[in-house]
Amino acid sequence: MSDARLHQLAATRWRLQIALTLAMVALYFGFILLIAYDKELLARLIVPGLSLGILLGALVIVSSWLLTWVYVRWANTHYDAELDRLRG
Amino acid sequence: MLALLQTVTRIGEPNTVAMGFFFLFIATTLGITWWAARRTRTTEHFYAAGRSISPGQNGVALAGDYMSAASFLGIAGLVSTTGFDGLIYSTGWLVGWPVVLFLIAEPLRNLGKYTFADVVAVRLRQTPVRIAAAVGTLATVSLYLIAQMVGAGGLIRLMFGIRYEAAVATVGAAMIAYVLFGGMLATTWVQIVKAVLLMSGAAILALLVLSRFHWSPAALFAAAADQYGAGVLAPGRLVSKPLDAVSLGLALMFGTAGLPHILMRFYTVPDAKSARTSVFYATGLIGFFYLMTFIIGFGAMVLVGPAAIKAVEPGGNMAAPLLAEFLGGTPFLGFIAAVAFATILAVVAGLTLSGAAALSHDLWVSVVRKELAGADEQLKVARIATVGLGILGVLLGITFKGQNVAFMVGLAFAIAASANFPALVLSIFWRRYTTAGAVTSMVLGTLSTLVLIYLSPTLQIDVLKHPTAWFPLRNPALVTMPLSFLSGIVVSLLTANQEEKLGFDGVARRMHLGAAEVKG
């Protein structure tokens, strides 16, 4: 089993883990800071009844799920395949 | 107004439908426990259901473990009385799950056996690390348990008219039965039954609301704005202090990845890939559930009205049951009340099991008996710990009767984020982490959170009724989480240990390939 290739795979996964975690942090705390500092913007109505705030809140939930989907898809295809190759 | 309401709502009166559903739930779950008991022979069964749970089942069970009655009733109540501000919580409770997936789930499954301390201790000195981890675990579990127990007693008294003490004792007896006899297998299936009930109850409620607004959420929100002003669709006063919001957000986001009862669930699946897949399912289910709270909350605001909701219970917690009564009459109220009860039972069962694992697996087997305990002794100690914790939970529930314990859930998340999460992340990803560093980050994380919450406005002003508080933040995670990371890093650098550092190479391999592969 090649240690160099395992190291490389670990490094790739580490970069993706950090990038996705930071994306999640940015999304959620971006939303929170908008609530704190720009209430007028979030009060604007996109269509009657649907304010930007409600839309963004729903989008934070949906995008959290999309981010998990991105990771699971990468892991199921690339990461698992590479692990299988390493196991030989 | 009040007199009128008392004739309108049947909440608090003995409700035959609720009782019927409740006994059906108890009978079903005890049946499951009887079935599971015959399959629970070793500690691997007791703590980890023999690693036999499928990713789909575990995804539903994770959702069941996480969606407490507080989130269903509390958020629906907040949205129905404040509008948009309540939705801030709906989003906050979900954002921890991607973090669980990205950083924790797979390494945990590959490195550990039953508890998260297994992972932290894997290349460090067992005794100090396990004691420190058990402190973090038991602090998180007890605070969470108190909040659930007090909530349960109040809720059941309000809904069924049963005495508080009797309600708490019933919850305690049922949860001890599940865990004691059926272990993780029974607990998992109780979670699954509960999650399905809760999701379907919420979905029916949301669909009935939407049916009155031409199936358009925007029409529902517009109706709310017509009646109560456009302000209900916009941020109000909840996030008046940005630092408070960020601090609570940190606790929710990173605390989820440090909750012992959630982490323990990753040991019930066969491998790391299943752990990964199960978080994906759980995130989808929980996200969908919190989206439904938007509809249910605004539905209760428009159809029942904030004044009527607060008249029944000032905290707004009865919004969803009142909405159910309005839309489906007493039978649907009974169903939702029984679902709320089932929800609490399932959550406390999961908490008790993870606390019992910390007591028996981490403290007794590893620290006291130095891994010399036989299989029978391990199982016996786990069961004794279960009964002990169950009784303690009931006593704490009765002790804190009538107290404002809502802050305890936030505190449990803050400890999880400031003690358990930093230790897990550093031990998984940082080669130079040492025993002294791990102990420092966990102990300091737990203690600083407890001290700062005591000095915070949450306790000083809201609970103790003092005019001022020493510490400005309502949730201390913004200070305590960085403190735990920093202290862990500094102490590790000061106590550099070549042997522990070399141990990391084996850990890194096992983290990716799993224990079986590395041994072979």
Image (tube, rainbow, N blue to C red):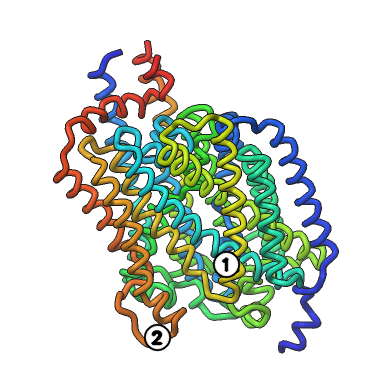
- What residue sits right under mark 2 in the picture? B466
Report x, y in % for residue B426. 28, 42
Expressed as whole percent of the image width and height from the top left, the position of residue B219 reads 61, 66
- Whichever of labels 2 and 1 marks the residue nearer the N terminus, that label is 1
Location of the N terminus of chain B by quadrant is bottom right
The part of the image, by quadrant, that contains residue B414 is: bottom left
- Identify the residue at the far left of this view: B494
Query: Circle 1 marks a residue in which chain?
Result: B
Disc 2 on helix, strand or loop? loop
Figure quadrant of the C terminus of chain B: top left
Image quarter of residue A8? top left
Q: Nearer the viewer, residue B418 or B129?
A: B129
Name the amino acid type tagged 1: Gly
**B368 versus B484 height, above or below:** above
Image mark count: 2
* Residue farthest to the top, as pictured: A88
Residue A76: image quadrant is: top left
The x and y percentages for residue B302 are: 64, 74
Residue shown at 53% from the left, 30% from the top? B374
Q: Determine the residue positioned at 61% across, 69% down.
A: B398
- Residue B383: which numbered mark, if any? none
How far apart are labels 2 and 1 at the CA level?
26 Å
Q: Is residue B55 visible?
A: no
Would you name the residue on which mark 1 appears?
A: B74
Q: Is residue B434 left or right of residue B303?
A: left
Give the answer, above or below, for where A11 lies relative to B414: above
Q: Is residue B190 left or right of residue A29?
A: right
The three-letter code of the residue at mark 2 reads His
Do the residues under discs 2 and 1 have CB atoms within 8 angstroms?
A: no
Residue at (23, 35) in percent of width and height: B431
